[in-house]
Image (spheres, grey):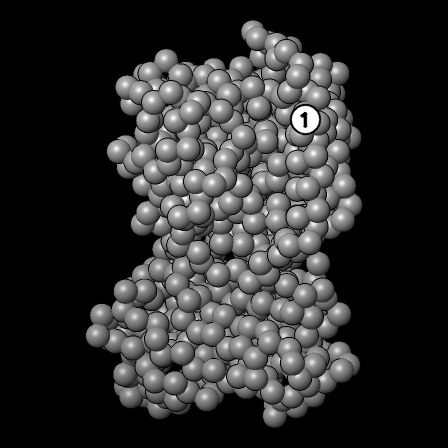
Amino acid sequence: MKHLLTLFVAFFVLSTSAQVKTKNTFDPSNAREGEGVEYCHQHKKMAALMQNPEHQYHRMMDSLEEFQLAKKPIQKGTVYKIPVVFHVLHNNGVENISDEQIYDAIEKMNRDYRLLNQDANNVHAEFQGMPADIEVEFLLATKAPNGQCFKGITRTLSPMSYQGADGGDQVAAIIAGNDVFNGTWPGNKYLNVFICGDIGGAAGYTTKPSGWSATQMTNGIWILHDYVGSIGTSSIGSSRTMTHEVGHWLNLDHTWGPNNNPGTASSCSTDDNVQDTPNCIGVQACIMSSNTCNSDNAYWGFDIRDNVENYMDYSYCSKMFTEGQKTRMRTALQSNNTGRANVISAANLVAVGAGATPYLCKADFISTRSTICVGDTLQFTDESYNLVNGWNWVFTGGTPATSTSQNPIVVYNTPGVYNVSLTASDGGTTDAEVKNNFIRVLPAPATIPFWEGFESYASLNNLINWEVINQENNNAFTIENTTAYSGNQCAKLVNFGQAPSNIDELISSPIDLSVVPANGTVTLSFRYSYRKKLAADYEYLKVFITGDCGESWVQRKTLGGTQLGSIALATSWKPSSQADWATVHMTNVTSNYFEQNFRVKFRFEGEGGNNFYLDDINLYGGSPSNTIVLGVNEDQTLNNITLYPNPVQDELSVEYTATSASEITVSIVDMAGKQVQAHRIQSNAGQNIIMMDTKELAAGKYTLLLQGNSGKTTLPFIKH
């Protein structure tokens, strides 16, 4: 009866004094020594939940049920199995960790909860023989709520990965956008683990068992990507964070009691409600000599040091749970009110596919990159699940064209957009995965001066010359044929009416800058037109460059907010004159990017503003020019070179002045670097005109090359 009375008193205190911390400020007393992230936010999250009267009521009922369960004998020798789903919430950054890192995390969790960790044999002498086998194992679920087979991992592309102030918003993004099942993953069926780039300043957090949230997906664990497992973005020192957070999920407090601040002076007056964990104030490092409280002497019969090697402390040498903690966790797993009992039930394990005999249910694969330059090599990796022992690959355009290896290496030598297919087998069942237009092999590098006015394209879809990235699968860069700065067409992003937080990219094919001397200069110019929708809009245009075909990018220009555009227009924007355009000259293409496979990327980051237009992308040697640079006359014997009409249909004319009579070669080269016409011309001193038949040329972009004895001249043109 005394215990029941205490529960009601605790309920009253929590309902009247709990406060919510709303601002994410770093609390060093809640961090392990030397770290800049708070180790755990479990008790802060619980304090916030206690503000909700409904949660307070259910927490009281849960405590009453826990009191009843504590009087029941705990089954020994019964191994409880917990089905886990890892939800990777990423924004295409390092937080999009590999499957292997997740598998490693599961292995480490099972090692720690089954007392298979060798370091448990090396606990301090006062705790020898105490480390407990919790008899709990973790299995990846293999069936989604709709019955679909999957590998226990979902992936969601969203900027919410780094917006961790509200974990509920992150879960909502996963529900709406993951790649397996768009709906709720009930917390009484799965242990949901949310892997993110930021979770409000903590390394991990969860909530203790509660009937209030039993079926909700938020009845799970949030964790930073670099605290998952021991490989990949994580490390051995961070590998036991999941062990710690699952302890909270199974109703354990920190060893010093129910707060997030180890080392505080008042902690000896609090306790973790586990008798065989000595009272302590907690540590932030591996201080083996720590002995901070004598209030535990009555239980132990002698003065005992702190159990700093316990998983529920903040030390870097955690390696054990106690039998008392085992009892408390296994009691929590028998609770029907909180959903934990259903999670481990035999019926649920069958329903979520945990522990089932694996079989092939889906063929899948990834590659190191999907856009490459001619001659580049790709590593393909089998991602089929959940059992595979046979592979048949087909690589259109690649060498080899077929393979039976699990993870083959393929080289592509011909420009184009190619399909890849994999037929996987488990020895009885087969499944095929075909990814159309999966590999983009870019054309041979264009020469400088390079100019793109988008005059020759009806569409940007599956175009070799320009790659369109549309992460949200909504409006993307396309061709606009009713307005431009020069010519008749430009690139356009219909940003008006889109939801906030959109990222769209337009990326060039290779441009050869290796011909530029190290002490030379290169200018990248372009024109754009943009209006805000509201005066408060803050959108970005960012320009990136690469010298290695896109393996690594560096940002070289940022235009944002009023710098990008200061005029607001409430209706859909379209430029009507050249005065509506701005010209940008970038002179920071430095010599370390004077490579054959130079590329440029334009990224627009929208927040629900207005439309964006792009035209006259011009890359050339020398200082900035307000007029388009179409050719560099390297042959000093040829002057005043002009090419017309441009764009051309049936006949192209080239006019120039020669300083003396000489023989030159005039050729036309397509974007793949293939010579499609070549003529030898005897030039006379003075003015010359060459007329070339272009009726048979396919529509597209070409380069005219004038080659003389003392150099060459290149001029780009468009065939309609």
Task: Determine whether 12 is above or below 125 in the image.
Answer: below
Q: Position of residue 648 (x, y in %)?
A: 59, 75
Is residue 192 found left or right of 688 in the rendered image?
right
Quadrant showing the N terminus:
top right
Residue 249: name its quadrant. Answer: top right
For disc 1, the marked residue is 66
Residue at x 36% of width, y 41% of height: 283
In which image quadrant can residue 600 be found?
bottom left
Q: Is residue 357 left or right of residue 639?
A: right
**What x and y, as percent, mark residue 687?**
40, 89
608 to 168, vertically: above or below: below
The answer to whether residue 691 is seen in the rendering is: no
Name of the residue lying farthest toward the left: 519
Q: Residues within 10 Å of mark 1 (few under 14, many from 20)?
A: some
Q: Could you say whether the residue bearing mark 1 is in a helix, strand or loop?
A: helix
**Do we see residue 255 in this rendering?**
yes
Q: Nearer the viewer, residue 261 or 592?
A: 261
Q: Residue at x 28, y 32 (%)?
A: 288
Q: Residue furthest top?
A: 77
Q: Quadrant of the C terminus?
A: bottom right
In the image, residue 447 sits, relative to residue 154, either above or below, namely below
Identify the residue at image location x=78%, y=45%: 54
Name which residue lies at 30% across and 36% down.
290
Q: Which residue type carries mark 1?
A: Glu
Q: Answer left or right for 556 relative to 566.
A: left
Question: Residue 154: x and y, percent?
Answer: 62, 37
Nearer-the-camera pick, 11 or 250: 11
Instruction: Please tell me which residue lies in front, 101 or 56.
Output: 56
Residue 630 percent coordinates (x, y): 44, 79
